């Protein structure tokens, strides 16, 4: 097959004929295989190593997030081993059911039967959809169960049956067990119930309330855990809303710029277009259009409010991408493919451009990471040089006779704890992060090392007494110095365990 024929098939996939849906399925499968390659080839980023530590002691909650990602990681490591591939296995495989839910939701909500493969493919070709289900963070199960919530809500639009009310509740509860931002998705669905007369009339009956009860029941393990731990996760996450009340409008431009890139530019354009009234003809009913509007715009209202005061991280909107992919598919099914009009040309370019973005990013992360940007490169900063750093620190540890390592940074702590198996690695401050672990106090006396990014001679001396600087080690990749770490030697007499220090 010539290159021209291949290009034509990919371009025509934007609005495929019925017999071309296997090509969409093939490209989705390719994205899943690419994620599996990333899982196997790219070292764990610090947050993944931290969540992998959670998975060693399963609980119903942790300081930072609900427990679902720890459960996913435990399942993957039981299947594939305690390695980067095993840690990421279930998040990657989540792309399969997530794609199914998005495909079926689009079929149920949109008038064109070709919308299903379009929506599922577009989701997988967004950078956030691709990488959100390639790494082991709470966003992976959140995206999966948000897609499930979307599908169940679409079934309710198609056929209002009690079972689907309960299914929406169960899916929402699982999303909340993944990450608390699912509450915004639940709020969007609640607004949809109030806006849609067919559903609003249901409020006098039992099923919407039963759905709410199921959500609370599924989410209850984490609620109980928080109640017995001083509501620490709720307080930590809720603090993001009130930590900065100054007017900072520059973050709003940053937020929309990030979404433009993470969605890929043309998917972003057509997602917004699909939400507009001009595309209402794409929807099977006004209910479906209003449902998607509520699911997207209610959370977006909060993110815009937040972005006027402080930074909104790009990945926070990941749970909106299943619904946004359906909106983009709506636009692509009603805008003519042929003709000289600008929108028609952009429409034909949507899949090739998004595919190019994802292919470049996947190759850059795995096969050909470069050093052009030096230490500013986020891929280098997050993924590279940890093994060499751990080896250098362990060499100092053995030479100094140290039996344990202390840090003051949860990310560094997680990487060292994962790479230096058998060596007690503990974070001296923020003990609340590790309440789920049995602190190995029998290893916290005698000679130890403290590893920090910044000079802390005076502070360490005030805590431990005399300290000795053993040197500085540098995390490197292909000659690029990524970060320097200072290694201190301490010695605590037997019978005097190390103090837990909160800065």
Image (cartoon, rainbow, N blue to C red):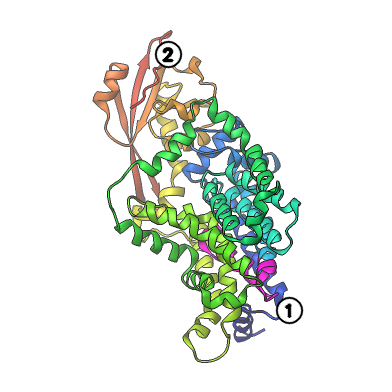
Which residue is labeled 1 in the image?
Answer: 18
Query: Mark 2 or mark 1, which has the lower sequence index?
Result: 1
Q: Nearer the viewer, residue 34 or 187?
A: 187
Q: Position of residue 127 (x, y in %)?
A: 51, 62
Q: Position of residue 384 (x, y in %)?
A: 45, 48
Q: Residue 309, can we see it?
A: yes
The residue under the point 39% across, 27% down is: 429
Q: Tell whether position 400 is magenta.
A: no
| Label 2 secondary element | loop
Q: Please identify the quadrant where the N terminus is shown.
A: bottom right
Which numbered tag is attached to residue 367?
Answer: none
The outermost residue toward the left is: 458
The residue under the point 53% across, 47% down is: 183
Residue 218: image quadrant is top right
| Label 1 secondary element | helix
Which residue is labeled 2 in the image?
Answer: 497
The magenta-colored residue range is: 106-132
Q: Residue 81, can we see it?
A: no
Q: Please identify the quadrant where the C terminus is shown.
A: top left
How far separated are the C-alphas under marks 2 and 1? Answer: 69 Å
Residue 29 in the image: above or below residue 42: below
Q: Position of residue 106 (x, y in %)?
A: 65, 67
Q: Is residue 35 left or right of residue 466?
A: right
């Amino acid at each position: 097959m010539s290159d021209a024929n291949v290009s034509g098939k990919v371009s025509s996939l934007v609005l495929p004929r019925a017999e071309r849906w296997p090509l969409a399925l093939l490209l989705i499968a390719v994205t899943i295989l690419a994620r599996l390659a990333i899982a196997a080839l790219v070292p764990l980023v610090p947050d993944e190593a931290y969540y992998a530590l959670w998975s060693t002691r399963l609980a119903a909650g942790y300081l930072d997030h609900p427990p679902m990602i720890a459960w996913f990681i435990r399942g993957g490591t039981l299947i594939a081993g305690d390695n980067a591939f095993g840690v990421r296995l279930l998040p990657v495989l989540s792309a399969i059911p997530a794609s199914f839910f998005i495909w079926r939701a689009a079929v149920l909500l949109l008038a064109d039967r070709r919308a299903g493969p379009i929506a599922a493919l577009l989701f997988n070709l967004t950078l956030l959809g691709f990488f959100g289900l390639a790494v082991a963070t709470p966003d992976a199960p959140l995206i999966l169960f948000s897609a499930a919530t979307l599908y169940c809500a679409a079934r309710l639009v198609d056929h209002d049956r009690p079972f689907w009310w309960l299914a929406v509740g169960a899916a929402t509860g699982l999303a909340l067990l993944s990450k608390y931002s699912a509450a915004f998705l639940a709020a969007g669905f609640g607004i949809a119930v109030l806006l849609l007369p067919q559903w609003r009339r249901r409020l006098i009956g039992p099923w919407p309330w039963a759905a709410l009860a199921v959500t609370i029941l599924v989410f209850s393990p984490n609620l109980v855990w928080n109640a017995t731990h001083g509501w620490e996760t709720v307080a930590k996450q809720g603090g993001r809303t009130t930590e900065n009340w100054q007017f900072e409008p520059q973050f709003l431009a940053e937020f929309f710029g990030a979404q433009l890139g993470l969605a890929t530019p043309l998917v972003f354009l057509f997602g917004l277009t699909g939400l507009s009234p001009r595309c209402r003809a794409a929807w099977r009913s006004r209910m479906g259009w209003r449902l998607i509007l509520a699911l997207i715009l209610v959370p977006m209202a909060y993110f815009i409010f937040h972005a006027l005061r402080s930074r909104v991280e790009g990945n926070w909107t990941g749970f909106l991408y299943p619904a946004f992919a359906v909106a983009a598919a709506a636009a692509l099914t009603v805008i003519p493919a042929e003709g000289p009009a600008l929108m028609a040309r952009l429409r034909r370019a949507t899949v090739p451009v998004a595919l190019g973005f994802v292919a470049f990013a996947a190759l850059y992360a795995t096969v050909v990471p470069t050093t052009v940007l030096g230490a500013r490169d986020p891929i280098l900063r997050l993924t590279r040089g940890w093994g060499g750093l751990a080896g250098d620190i362990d060499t100092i540890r053995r030479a100094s006779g140290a039996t344990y390592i202390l840090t003051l940074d949860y990310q560094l702590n997680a990487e060292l704890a994962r790479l230096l198996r058998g060596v007690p690695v503990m974070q001296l401050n923020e003990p609340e992060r590790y309440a789920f672990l049995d602190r190995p106090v029998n290893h916290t006396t005698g000679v130890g090392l403290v590893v920090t990014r910044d000079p802390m001679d005076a502070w360490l001396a005030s805590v431990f007494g005399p300290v000795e600087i053993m040197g500085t080690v540098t995390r490197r990749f292909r000659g690029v110095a990524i970060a320097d770490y200072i290694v201190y030697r301490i010695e605590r007499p037997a019978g005097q365990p190390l103090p837990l220090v909160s800065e």
